[in-house]
Image (cartoon, coloured by chain):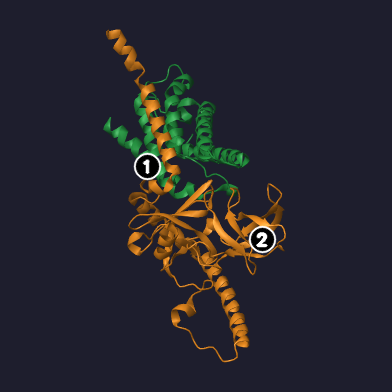
Amino acid sequence: MIVTTLKRMAWALLLLMLQVLVLDQVHPWGYGAPLLCPLIVVTLPMGTSRISALLWGFGTGLVADTFAGTPGIGSAALTFIAFIQPPLLKLMAPRDSEEELHPSFSTLGRWNYLRFILLLFLIHHVIYYALESFSYAHIEDAVISLGVSYVVSVLVATVVEYVRNPQK
Amino acid sequence: MHDFIERITAYVHWAIFLLLEVLSGFMLFQYNHYQGSIWFTQANTVSGIVHEWEAQVLSYLRLPAENAALVRRNTILQQQNDVLRHKLQAISAPPLEQKDSTKKDSPLGEGYEGSFIPARIIDNSVRKRDNMLVIDVGSEDGVAPEMGVVSGTGVVGIVSGVTSHHALVMSILNSHSSISCRLRGTEYFGYLKWKGGSPLRAYMDDVPRHARIHKGDIVETSGFSNVFPAGIFLGKVAKITNSDDGLAYKLEILLGTDLSNLRHVNVINTPDKAELDSLLAQ
């Protein structure tokens, strides 16, 4: 129990560092930076209690926000996807899967897992950019930022997942 | 009864979900008064240390480009200095006596008596609607809110909050930023504002229609506020368009400072600032 929690914390820390130290400095074509934090929520194993999932989402968002100077934005978006991740995972997992299934390309199937990532990232990004551009005069800019960041984020997330769990 | 409790506990996660979202919303709105919320930003101690470490690595990687820009800027200033000195000598018949050294070295505009506090940017963003940056000097180094921040290539922003070793700076790339400026050599003034999009383009509003403006005219600080002395370079006029109401010109300004690639800045410490502030408060 403690070991798995520590492992997950190390994983979250790794992704957060990647986010803060590398991705926050990248602005593809001058638009929104890729956001990798949703991957921490995406990879929560099946059987995680709803409450602990929410706390993981909120906590991750809080840390990411503090470093990026966007209090409330990331935590709101991540809490939301942490709320829908458990039922969505149950829906997408194969019926005969083990109780503590860890979402990955090998356990969910390549296409299924990609769909899972695409969906959760989309919801996260829409909330994130909607909140960030609360007072946006140029709505087009927000939409372009959302699109660019979404595509790049999913690409980075896919690469990270392949590195974490190499396919044979 | 047992059934009732079970049913309640089954929905506890809804309550927690709503609670956490409300908490996020609270932080979001609190942040709008960014001056008051410095503890929850990049300038707090923990993230300050991490960003500082990161900035150290990055500043090494970007040294060559930074150096090149400095050298270029230096050369321009030297040339300008030379031209001006000759002009001055031509005008005043008796040869000029050397002024005291503090004023002679001041690279900034007219009547400038402040000093610089050199600083390094440890966190910066240009992609948001309201961009802020964090510098590695704070109240213990003499930095106070409302002080101006400049780089070798022009205005960077205004200090909006300080902790003991860090300061949060409202970048000119912020929807709340508004810097009093004028066209060099004229008395036409206005406010420089950024409206999102490219970090190199800002706008100067409310320039009267009878003003004679050309592309490439230099926009500088007006010195009306006590944040920046007059004559600091802001950018050049890139495009002349009509204002939204059609009564004035709206100038698109190509900013002189590329904030997305900036490491070293100076905070302007205006010595008579406290005096001016108390005067304005009256």
Quick one: B220 or B246, which is closer to the camera?
B246
Q: Residue at the location (66% across, 60% down)?
A: B237
Where does the image place residue B9, in percent across and percent down from the top left?
Answer: 32, 17
Q: Residue at the location (64% across, 63% down)?
A: B188
Q: Secondary structure at mark 1?
A: helix
Where does the image place residue A149, in percent across and percent down from the top left?
Answer: 55, 41
Q: Residue furthest bottom?
A: B94
Left/right of residue A162 with respect to residue B218 in the rendered view? left
Q: Amino acid at mark 1?
A: Leu
| Mark 1 burial class by Cα count in 10 Å: few <14, some 14-19, many 20+ | some
Quick one: B225 or B215, which is closer to the camera?
B225
Q: Which residue lies under the disc numbered 1?
A: A13
Tell me where residue A155 sits by quadrant: top right
Above or below residue B280? Residue B127 is above
Residue B147, numbered label: none
Q: Amino acid at mark 2?
A: Val
Where does the image place residue A29, in percent across and percent down from the top left?
Answer: 60, 48
Q: Secondary structure at mark 2?
A: strand
Q: Residue at the location (50% across, 30% down)?
A: A120
Q: Which residue lies under the disc numbered 2?
A: B237
Q: Chain of mark 2?
A: B
Left/right of residue B104 with respect to residue A59 in the rendered view? right
Q: Which chain is orange in the rendering?
A: B
Marks 1 and 2, how far apart in space?
46 Å
Q: Which chain is green in the rendering?
A: A
| Position of the N terminus of chain A by quadrant | top left
* Front tag of 1 and 2: 2
Q: Does residue B265 appear in this view? A: yes
Left/right of residue B277 with respect to residue A151 in the rendered view? left
